[in-house]
Amino acid sequence: MTVSMPSSVDETLRLLSDDPAATILAGGTDAMVEINYEHRRPASVVSLRRVNELATWSIDGGTVRLGATVPYVEIMNSELAAASPGLAQASRTVGSSQIRNTGTVGGNLATGSPAGDTIPVLAALDAIVEIASVRGIREVAVVDLIVGVKRTVLEPDELIVAIRFPVASGPQEFLKIGPRNAMVISVASCALVINQAERSVACALGSVSPAPLRCGDAEEFAAANIDWTSDGIRITDPRTLETFGSMVADAASPIDDHRSTAAYRKHGIAVMARRALTRATTS
Amino acid sequence: MSAKIEVSFQLNGKQRELQVLPSANLRDVLRGEGMFSVKFGSASGETGAAAVLFDGKLASSDVILAAQADGHSITTVESLNTERELHPIQAAFAAVGALQSGYSAGAMVLGTMALLEQTSDPSESEIRDMLGGILDRETAYVKPVEAVKRAAAVLRGETVTGFEPMILTPLTDGKNAAIYDAKNKPPPGSGAVPRLIPSRDVPEMAVVGKPEVKVDAVRLAKGNPAFTDDIEPRAMLYCRLLTSPHAHANIVDIDDTAALALEGVHAVLHHKNVARIKYASGGQSWPNPHPHDQVSFDTKVRHVGDRVAAVAADTIEIAEEAVRLIKVEYEVLPAVFDEREAMLPGAPKIHDEVDTEEIFDADKNIVHEIKAQRGDVEKALASAPHVFEQTFRVHQVQQCPIEPHISIAWIDEDERMVIRTATQVPFHARRMVAPLLEMDIKDIRIIKPRIGGGFGAKQEMLLEDIVGHLAKATRRPCRLELTREEEFASSRTRHPQTITYRTGVDDDGKLVAQDMYVIGNTGPYGTHGYTVQTVSGMRGLSQYNCPNKRFHCDVVYTNIPVPGAYRGYGAPQAEFALEAHLEDIAIELGYDVIEFKRKNWVTAGSVIDIAPHLGERAVVDGELDEYPIVMTEGIEECVAQAMREIGWHRRDDAAWREPADRPHIRRGLGFAFCMHGTAIPFLDMGGCSIKLNDDGSFNMLVGATDLGTGADTVLGQIAAEVLGVRLEDIKVYSSDTDMTPFDTGAYASSTTYISGTAAMRAAEVARTRIKERAAMLLDVEQPCTIELRDRRAYAPDGSSVSMEDIALDSLHTQEQEQIMGTASYVSPDCPPPFAAQLVEVEVDIETGQVTVPKMVMAVDCGVAINPITASGQVEGGMLQALGYAHCEEFAYDDAGKMLNTSFGPYKIYRADEMPETVVYLVQTMEDSGPFGAKAVAEIPKDGVAPALRNAILNATGAAINDLPFTPERVWAALNDK
């Protein structure tokens, strides 16, 4: 095994071009587990620890640009938390403090696990993933990045360099159900993003399907039934909240597995979606 | 193999250039450089035991390549060890009893360093967030949190006082129930401080009963090389196991040609080249209960994770590669996992071999049938005015010591086999491994160094035979450490059971008959199957008075990973069912739940009549002349203190139960009455020897195995009390089968009581001779008039001589002799500790999610020899018990492969998730125990599950009879009610 420690994106891309089979190591919280367990025995590893430009973020106008290796702890504790409260909430539920010190959103996306905590939030934010290779940069929506369980559209020589999404313009919520709240692969998770400027609602689910799932009908229903005012948003009819919950649940097609039955997952999603919208419209 | 690469980084402030393999992780490289505080807990980093500061941030070195450290700064606890004195952070961990096994102490100390760099006065939630990255099965994080607060205060320049228990006045007369008064509020103060209710029967003592700092605190706080893996013999080989991918299969053929051909491979062992010698792996007294249904390597595998072969090679990587190269042809057989299905006609026969004797009914997979009866249960049930029947199912969990099983074996210069191993039972392991290695017991030496938690998983002869075989085959030292996956699937677990109670009650609310039928799932091997289920019977039928009792148990083979000993040993299963069953009966009959149990629970003078008819030395038939009697109990005081602490009146407060601002939340409180045993009477034996040194100190050798429990400290305190010296004057060594006296080992809540009495008696023998020599030096006629205290011997006239002078005189001056004492102890008694366990719950009635804000346990453990370590035992026990009740669970696919073999998917409680816990120690003076002690280690495992279940019932009206209380199970129960 060889280990490369590039210090720039360009150098990283050249390495990946020369050796597309290389394993990319960011925080290491996913990839190193596989290396240690030898599920995956890479001949070569490219460590991103020295690629400082990947670990930076910026807020430009209404857009957040999050470098792929910004650790969760940074998202929780910097101005990013105000710019993206939903992502900050999801980051808080990732692993333990040690994992949050090193784990990254880019790694979460590249792994493409259905249970990745930040993925539903990014899906609801309509986040765009900047993917680079020696051939140039391409952009892919988060919902299109992940195509199956731990399967993405990333080519072997490609690197996620950043994720872009709009600065919050309204309430954002992230909820999940598990045996307990944290450090558990959730039975189901739900992200809700309300954009007051555009008067739109976005809702995405995690852990219920191989790829992150958006709930279009429910989103339109909620947007149509929210009382959009200049000093906040309200839902006057409690039945609207219930209906929204069941519409989100209908969008999911959960399955029975060893963690949970489809029936419970569906019920849990309805409750979470309703609660997310309730919180968002009463805060 | 890859060539090494050079990395350059700052290690504890010094620039280091190292040659490392590209694939080497930082943990292994740091350990190779002598940073022993960095520990292995799992390869995936989630135990946090391998934490380091990476550029000042706490990070797990499991998931960092050594190559990635290039150009960075790495800090370990060793950076603090420049002085003999402890750093204030280390001192704080020692002072408050935050170190039990201390396996993760290094990580916790480092995390504290990093946190206190950021803020000098961290909040509780900041502290818990930091500790949340370091899993701990022992302390429940209670005292570590306290240690961080204390360290912060010290570093801010504040003065801190000694960490001592809070002494409270009793609420009862020691016998009768107290009248509950909602206005009487519990005393305020940190939950880390044990509340101690002294008994007037307990005399004042100098060392016993005091919050002494543990004798091993320094070595643990510094991360010194104390554990099995911290010492490597030269030319050591690394071993790996090949385990079964199938739940049930015959091994048709094994071909090791390719594995043996791999360069660096020294041995590949399997059923074709290791003698077939039958044994049972449970670490128990001779003769080990039948059936002896295991061999080192069998021709058949009986669970996913079962042993197939073992490899010894120059490196772990080569060993792993060799394991992959072993070709095994399996004939896959149908498998069965549920104990109820395993007994049915047509179920696959798991033990069809001809050479296993004494399986009760191999065709039905019934390994043992256990029966015991007092009175006539059927007759009593037939005439009882109220009869209740209820069935409970309890599930499989794992002990999860953060240090996995690890053993290192080598053949010494005298051709003897030395095995340094993480075991709770060194003497049993020596006796049990000898025949498998075809060696004599006298040619085997077992060394038990420091153990990173065991909880019963290490009451087993698990790896010792494998490393022994490999050391014999290679004539090189051989090391085998389980991975976390193997720790789950290939070590030991808790027995699942299906428990049915039938109970008859008269019109006064008195129990007239109790019938308990258990189907115990012992997996594919008997190991502790017989004894664990007998303890279920004993605990399930002892704590309530009832004239007619019957226990019937079928212990059943299945194809799940092997259940064995787990702290509590059958009691948590039984007490969950019992306390839930009686709760429901009380409600059905309209009684207050505590009042109903009080009508029936045992009190001082009650006869425990079924116990002698169950167990390894059971009286199967006939009557005994004498039955054990409860001599001491502080039950009512426990109940009164615990009720006050939790605020029991809130059960009737509608506004609290249904908070207006959180309409989907229901709150409740639950109670469980607990009783446990103290050691196995007539069976458990401990030995101790003590000798006096030149400076008036003593070496104390004990066979008892401290796993982090504080046994060395407690035994030292007992000896110090007898000898009139300080704890620091007693140098405790445990255990080494060549050096220390025999001890059955650390299990069955026996160490303080059995080994403690041995320590007391050995000290008394030495004391007698010390007094004689002191009398000579002081010119006193009667040595018995001499008193030992404050490191001196006093004559009645007040004249005195120091222990040092007595020692020098005896060793160097006149009629020289070595003053020493050796003693051992086995008890005819098994005095039960008692406890009241209370749990507060919040249930989300929409999702079924359960949250536990607070747990209170008030324990009567006699005299706590050390109230700090005793309360630590209770706290850690409650953590494990809460995981059992709430979130820990083996998940399998249909073929019997465990799916959640890592922490995270297998969920254990973390620091930032633990409820508030408060521990009360209610003193009683148990005359049969050393200085009044009874057991404390296992009883905290017994009450949490039923108390939580009863709290959920109180909150929501849903009675749940299966564990654990996952959101879905609770939600389903809410829908069903």
Image (cartoon, coloured by chain):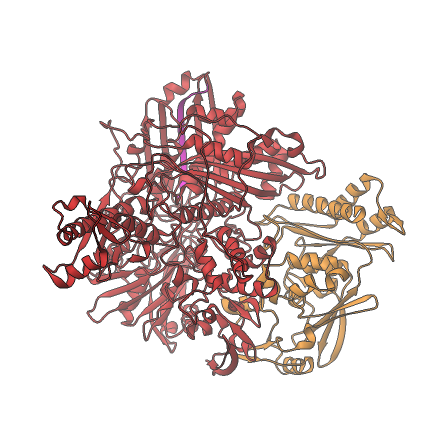
State the image coordinates of residue A201 (x, y, percent, origin top left).
Answer: 82, 53
Is residue B516 covered in magenta?
yes
Q: Quadrant of the N terminus of chain B?
A: bottom left
State the image coordinates of residue B141 (x, y, percent, origin top left).
Answer: 51, 52
Answer with the quarter of the image where residue B575 lies.
top left
Residue drawn at x 66%, y 83% as measured from the top left: A11
Image position of B720 (left or right of B239): left
Give the overall secondary structure of the magenta segment. strand
Image position of B647 (left or right of B102): right
Answer with the quarter of the image where residue A166 lies.
bottom right
Q: Quadrant of the C terminus of chain B?
A: top right
Is residue B963 covered in magenta?
no
State the image coordinates of residue B280 (x, y, percent, origin top left).
Answer: 30, 50
Position above or below: A176 against B119? above
Front position in the image: B249 or B518: B518
Is residue B928 visible from the viewing direction of this image? yes
- The region drawn magenta spans B509-521
Question: In the current view of this chain or complex, which residue is farthest to the right?
Answer: A230
Residue drawn at x 71%, y 50% as measured from the top left: A252
Residue drawn at x 47%, y 31% as measured from the top left: B171
Q: Colour of chain B?
A: red
